[in-house]
Amino acid sequence: MKDARPGPFQLRYWDGWRLFSLAVALLVVISLAVVCLSWLTPAPEIWQHLRQTLLARLLLNSLWLVLGVGSLTLLLGVSLAWFTATCEFPGRRFFSWALLLPLAMPTYVLAFVFVGLLDFAGPVQTLWREWFGRDAWFPAIRSTPGVIIVMSLALYPYVYLLAKNAFQTQGRRAMEAAESLGCGPREGFFRVALPMARPWIAGGMLLALMEALADFGAVSIFNYETFTTAIYKAWFGFFSLTTAAQLASLLVLLVFILIVVEQRLRARRRFSTARSSAHATRLPLKGWRAWGASCFAGGVLLIAFGLPVVQLSLWTLASYAEEFNVRYFSLLGRSIGLGLSAAVLICLTALVLSYAARRHTDPLTRGLVRVANLGYALPGAVLAVGIFIPLAAVDNILIALGESFFGWHLRPLLQGTVVIMLLAYLVRFLAPGFKPVEGAMNRVTPSIDEAARLSGLRGPALLARIHFPILRGGLLTAATIVFVDVMKEMPITLMTRPFGWETLAVKIFELTAEGEWERAAVPAVALVAAGLIPIILFMRHSEK
């Protein structure tokens, strides 16, 4: 009997759900294609200049960044996760959640705090010279080790969070099995626990390294040349979008290499996903080991979060009266408005995609939904270029058509508007918004729908009275994450904003570019406070 279901080459196959999924997936694909196809338009003079002066340094700096941040986040994240997940020591319960707090600190805020403290004119070096003389050696903060340490302090929570979950899942049973085979604690950790947690650790490191390669604010403050700073200079320095797109394609290639390496680390391995059982069988540390673990966790937390918060508070108190004025309400309003607009747009998009994947389980629809969520792997600077170029081309076509057929002298409709920013945010942050919504959607089982229909509920009434209460938690989580991420996002905002349009993140960039650390503390405090919201929500959720 012939199958009556329509295929992808038939018009009736493409209902509204599939067409919407196709549109969002095309937005991601076009952004990436524009960046990669930029090589069809060579810019030999600018590239000759880049090859002679900059390219080798970009590659070398990126390599150091990957190696350095990868090694340090691995060391900090795994060791802290191991202690808090499997050992008992003074303060373990506090450090278990408090070590996530540095996630609320944008890398560029941490960068200008450390540069302001440790640079030549900063209070630490000044005091150092008073104590040990003017010629006393002091390590330079604006250096490769400096940027690696600062980025690692901001990004280690990615590894810590995933590794801790992995170690909690293993519990003590894996170590007990290793001990029964004659392994000591150290040998059991390296030969059993660490290999079993490898996929989670690799996933955390991938996130940390992608953030490091995509970072723009911190490396700008350190004057550390990377692909993101080069993309910005090519766009706004050389006014060459083509060169910016070509540099962005090289950055995409580096991110792709990282993803391939991470996937190979997971290949051909299967791991248990049993529920946590570590809480009852943690290894009690005694004597100097117990206090050593407390000091290690406390030291990392103090340097990565406590010290920056204290310094930001002192700078804010010193500059608040002079710096804070009515204009800040405008900056705050724009940041909040941008975050709310992006949160609404992304939550609605995630909701429709979740319904599309629920209604149509065929490979093509699921593939479109998966492609739509790939934008999170693209750095903000790349997306800014990939979104701006096609929309600028659409503008130019509309202007040419208006002049040719009607004699109209149109102005650009999309360039210089927040539409480009919102589309770039949609591509960049759809994945973190989609995951909570998809998780909540999985709770809407077919039996719930059948029971509701038997009660006479259909269409909007079914959505309002049955689905929405179940999805509300996932939507709230998604909106919170997107809101805070958009408020902190710097490259997309900086590169696609309308002329003269400022937000808190842009204000921080402008002030730190001039070395105005105290003045930059006022908007930075607002951003850190906003960043704490999803962290607190996550911790409350994980404790349930």
Image (cartoon, helix red, strand yellow):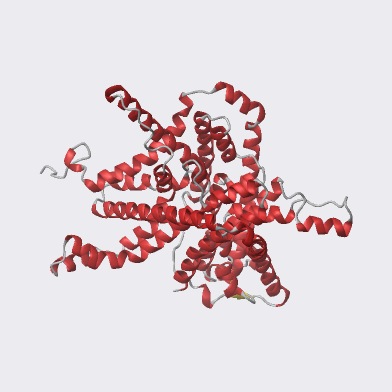
> Does residue 395 sit above or below 334 in this rendering?
above
- Position of the N terminus, as image quadrant, is top left
Q: Quadrant of the C terminus?
A: bottom left
Q: Position of residue 31 (x, y in %)?
A: 41, 37
Residue 476, percent from left and from top: 38, 63
Give the residue at the far left of this rendering: 1
Please determine whether, in this image, residue 390 is positioned above or below residue 48: below
Q: Quadrant of residue 91?
A: bottom right
Residue 74, compared with residue 14, is above or below; it is below
Image location of residue 12, percent across then percent down: 17, 42
Instruction: In this rendered view, identify the residue nearer to me: 47 or 2.
Output: 47
Q: Which percent across, then down, holds residue 486?
A: 47, 53
Q: Residue 90 versus residue 314: which sits nearer the camera?
A: 314
Q: How many marks?
A: 0
Name the residue at 62% across, 28% down. Answer: 50
- Picture quadrant where residue 449 is located: bottom left
Residue appearing at x 30%, y 42% in the figure: 22
Pick the front one: 315 or 158 = 315
Using the image as rendered, state which of residue 124 and residue 437 is in the foreground: 124
Residue 74 makes an appearance in the image = no
Instruction: Please tell me which residue is depicted at 53% across the width and 59% down the height of the picture.
Output: 196
Q: Residue at x 60, y 70 (%)?
A: 95
| Residue 159 is at least partly visible in this image | yes
- In this rendering, is residue 253 above or below 510? above
